[in-house]
Image: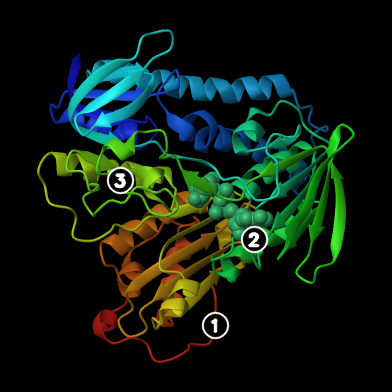
Amino acid sequence: MTHTQIAIIGAGPGGYAAAFLAAGRGMKTMLIDAEAAPGGVCLHRGCIPSKALLHAVKLLTETREAEKIGLHFPPPRIDLERLRGWKEEVVQRLTNGLAQQCRAREVTWLQGTARFLNSTTLELRQPDQEPQSITFEKAIIATGSRPAAIPGVDMDLPGVMDSSQALQLDVIPASLLVIGGGNIGLELGTVYAALGTRVWVVEAGPGILPGLDRDLVRPVAARLGKIMAGVSVGARIVALTPNGTGLKVVVADSEGRETTHEVERVLVAAGREAVSEGLGLENTRVTRNARGEIQVNAGMMTQDPAILAIGDVTGGPMLAHRAAMQARVAVASLAGYPPPHRQPIIPAVTYTDPELAWAGLLEAEARAKGIETRAVRFPWAASGRAHTLERTDGVTKLILDPSTGAILGVGITGPGAGELIAAAVVAMEKGATAQDLAHMVHPHPTLSETFAEAADLFLGHCVHYHAPARGAPPPGNVQRPLL
Ligand code: NAI
């Protein structure tokens, strides 16, 4: 029987981060995953391959749009095999790096499927080997999530894909219907549309990216409207049946009017669900909610004193960086530290064109919670840098406490928003106010200036955009003299 101090099940960005951090604290650590290499969904068939493809199609789009500024390229020739090969090389490089890190940090990497026999023992099944028992002092479950099925849609029908299959990019279909106008649907829909597929998006909610502020979503919706064959919101799938070599999809709009689409492929991207069954949790004291998500406290501990859980298996938001943050908390718990006194701000990015990034409180959420806020929007049409990039469709929005100027939330839509949001997280985590931000010098010409100019708008001192001041400027450190 093998013994380890820490057994980690699942080697995605939560699991491998936990393994490296635990090993870094001198704990004897074992990292187990059914896949041949560490990385999880994020690296093998999620964040990384999708962003590689989005980078490729951004180049395509830019060459097409360069005509406007006097640069003429012949129509691009897409070598699908090479594109697929490059994307796989990117994944391979990173998985090799993780395997190397496991060796360097003396983490025992095991390919296999683990199941709890009790709160101190796992049964490990490895390819072509007899099952073996592993005893542990503490275990961390980091088994992640998988695409959720939707009622009435048979995922086994030929031509119906989930995000993993869509990322394989085996063909560029002539037509594709995407079910779900969330992150996955819009990002992968963008990839296929740019490669030449006619793409329809069907979203059940009242708008794409439901839940987010509409003023942030509008520039995304406007551009998607140009590259997609159609985007239906408030719509549902009535029937999905085989149709020759393709599929027939009947979609009903919010008034019940039906439209029939005959498409080559359908992508189901209607959310993800926790992977928590088959783990033998019934042999432990770990509890799950009705959605199968493992219940944890602020220190990522389950109801079983020997078992912790992190990442998507604990519920949403299902984001790799949230899982990685939870890995830190879990390993700190193992080392005997108390849980953090508050939840950190978790930013989120939708990698469409333009990108949409947000962190902290959004207006829609503030309204729902009855929190009084004031929002200011700095349109990128007033940004010199945005003009030099020929991308003035963005917006930088701050959600502030009207009485103190404290920054409660930030939303950015525009190319590179995913990089820009990091500064907003730093500002909010450090308790910055609009006044603080306005006093920080941002380099010119950059898109980062839009962040400071939005703060200036709130204070009534904006140089590049004039909007009549609403309400009195906040008291407090607004008295600090302006530069
Ligand atoms: P999602 O929750 O972001 O979006 C799913 C969308 O499908 C929602 O807008 C929902 O209203 C819609 N929907 C649900 N049932 C439907 C139906 N029957 N017909 C039509 N529309 C329907 O989920 P998604 O895009 O599948 O992503 C899964 C998870 O992975 C999310 O937690 C997401 O945040 C995360 N993710 C994050 C990414 C990022 O950070 N850029 C990229 C990809 C995924």
Q: Which residue is mark 3?
A: 325
Callout 1: helix, strand or loop? loop
Q: Which residue is mark 2?
A: 208
Spatial separation of the CA atoms under disc 2 and disc 1: 28 Å
CB under 8 Å between discs 2 and 1: no
Q: Is residue 231 left or right of residue 311?
A: right
- Circle 1 crowding by C-alpha within 10 Å: few under 14, some 14–19, many from 20: few
Residue 163, quarter of picture: top right
**Amino acid type assigned to the residue bearing label 2 in the image:** Ile
Label 2 near ligand 1 (CB < 8 Å): yes
Near-viewer residue (347 or 456): 347
**Amino acid type assigned to the residue bearing label 3 in the image:** Met
Q: Earlier in the sequence, mark 3 or mark 2?
A: 2
Q: Position of residue 59 (x, y in %)?
A: 67, 37
Q: Is residue 204 left or right of residue 424?
A: right
Q: Is residue 431 left or right of residue 268?
A: left
**Amino acid type assigned to the residue bearing label 1 in the image:** Ala
Q: Earlier in the sequence, mark 2 or mark 1?
A: 2
Callout 3: helix, strand or loop? helix
Q: Earlier in the sequence, mark 3 or mark 1?
A: 3
**Most distant residue in the front direction:** 283
**On residue 467, which mark appears?**
1
Spatial separation of the CA atoms under disc 3 and disc 1: 39 Å
Tell me the mark number nearer the camera, choosing from 3 and 1: 3
Near-viewer residue (220 or 30): 30
Residue drawn at the location 44% of the way across and 71% of the way down: 398
